[in-house]
Amino acid sequence: MQEVLDRIDPEAIARDTLDFIRVRSETGQEGEGSRFLAELLRREGFAPEMDEFLPNRPNVLLRIPGSAADGGRTLLFNGHTDTIPIGVSDPPGRDGDWVIGRGAEDMKGGLVAMVHAASALRRAGVQLGGDLWLTGVVGHETPIGFKEGPLRLVDQLNSGAVQADAIVIVEGPAAVWAASLGSTVFTVTITSDRGAIHTVKVPYVENPACWMGHLLTRFAEWEREFEARPEHPLCGRERVNVGIIRGGDYMNRLPTPLIVSGQRRWLPGQTAADVQGEFDALCHELSARSGLHFETRLEGTREPFETPADHPLVCALRSAGQQTTGAVPDVIGMALVGDANLYANLAGVSTAYYGPAHETAHSDHERVSATRLAECAQIYALAAMEYCGVREGRSEKEDGRRGK
């Protein structure tokens, strides 16, 4: 293990991360970012596959075969090669330990750490008992991306083209993020059969704007109910919130339709069908009371995920963290949803996150610590050894030395 750890160089990881940040790979135009990741893997002695299922937007796949005779578990490391738009974010650069620029924390640094972890295992002559997969996907960041890359990987997991007993996503805080709430974007539309006529002809009590208030009041009641219910020990409480209210085109015309859009988040143990039922019941009630039409559409829906604290993947990450940093990483949950919600629910593969930090992602001052990235690479390598197992007997390196 120590030889593996010694082969991870924080400065080399920082250089590669900065070079990766300099490659523009905004969502929808990830081609150059995926090619950079593939070239980095080739430089380290691997032969990745470019899965160009979309024109100039390939996923990157690499299988490192384990020793089949040992029957070890298969572990898949995963991250996304796309970033949100660069905008006015800080330009790529270094400031002491910090690597700066769009994608530093989210999540080019984690992908580089993943590659260096696998390289350290190879150069130390370690052969894992089970297969190790390294993957980079496109189309992660919404609203431009529609999870094209993660869903493609889900299809390959379900077909057996890619195999994994567990997945580590290489982003997030320096903790084992093992649970997330479910999430959906809801849109409630209120319409009147009267159409957009002069408001002098319509009593206010029949105005969609009046009933918009009733809807928002009910959301406030939901929030009070959620606050009173027991929280999930990792993810906190369920919630509803509103981000868009839109409608009307003139001060004395009936505003129809009116649109309310926001997010609804729910706990593990509940489902999107439960949430749809709540909205349907509310719309039915308000339609009956108002004489207007209330309809709800849910999109971008992802079910909750939770990987138990005693799962071998969580145990491997915590053990690796303790050996690397001297402290056992916390097991946490977050209200945020991500690709783990897809892999766990659509492919049935237990998933957890471990990354360098979750502090500056999507900000204009994105940065990541080179020291923390090196720790991540060490943790990824040791976790792979524990989870997949290591081939018994002499390593290839030792065999070579003895033959000289």
Image: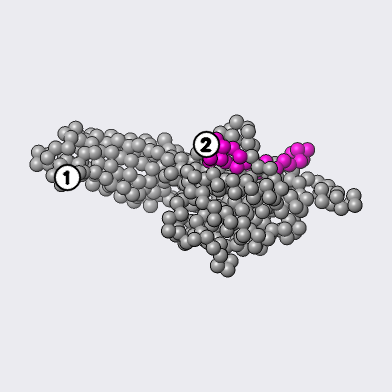
Q: First in sequence: mark 1 or mark 2?
A: 2
Residue situated in front as seen by the camera: 89 or 77 = 89
Q: Residue at x 68, y 60 (%)?
A: 9
Give x and y (percent) for residue 273.
42, 35
Q: Which residues are magenta?
A: 50-76
Q: Which numbered marker is on residue 259?
A: none
**What is the CA distance from the residue labelled 1 to the residue labelled 2?**
44 Å
Q: Helix or strand or loop: what does disc 2 sit on?
A: loop
Give x and y (percent) for residue 3.
76, 58
Q: Residue at x 56, y 40 (%)?
A: 58
Are there few (<14), some (14-19), or many (20+) residues within 10 Å of tag 2? few
Q: Which quadrant is home to the N terminus?
A: bottom right
Query: Residue tagged by mark 2?
Result: 54
Residue depth check, mark 1 versus mark 2: number of the one nearer the observer: 2
Q: Amino acid at mark 2?
A: Leu
Asked where in the image residue 280 lies, by quadrant, the reply is top left
- Residue 90 visible, this orientation: yes
The colour mode here is one colour
Q: Which numbered marker is on residue 250?
A: 1
Q: Amino acid at mark 1?
A: Tyr
Residue extending farthest to the bottom is 96
Q: Residue at x 46, y 40 (%)?
A: 146
Please indicate whether residue 198 sits to the left or right of residue 93 in the image: left
Give x and y (percent) for residue 213.
23, 46
Asked where in the image residue 375 lies, by quadrant, the reply is bottom right
How many numbered badges does the structure rendering display? 2
Is 176 drawn above or below residue 298 in the view shown? below
Asked where in the image residue 325 lies, by quadrant, the reply is bottom right
Residue situated in front as seen by the camera: 294 or 135 = 135
Is 254 drawn above or below residue 118 in the view shown? above
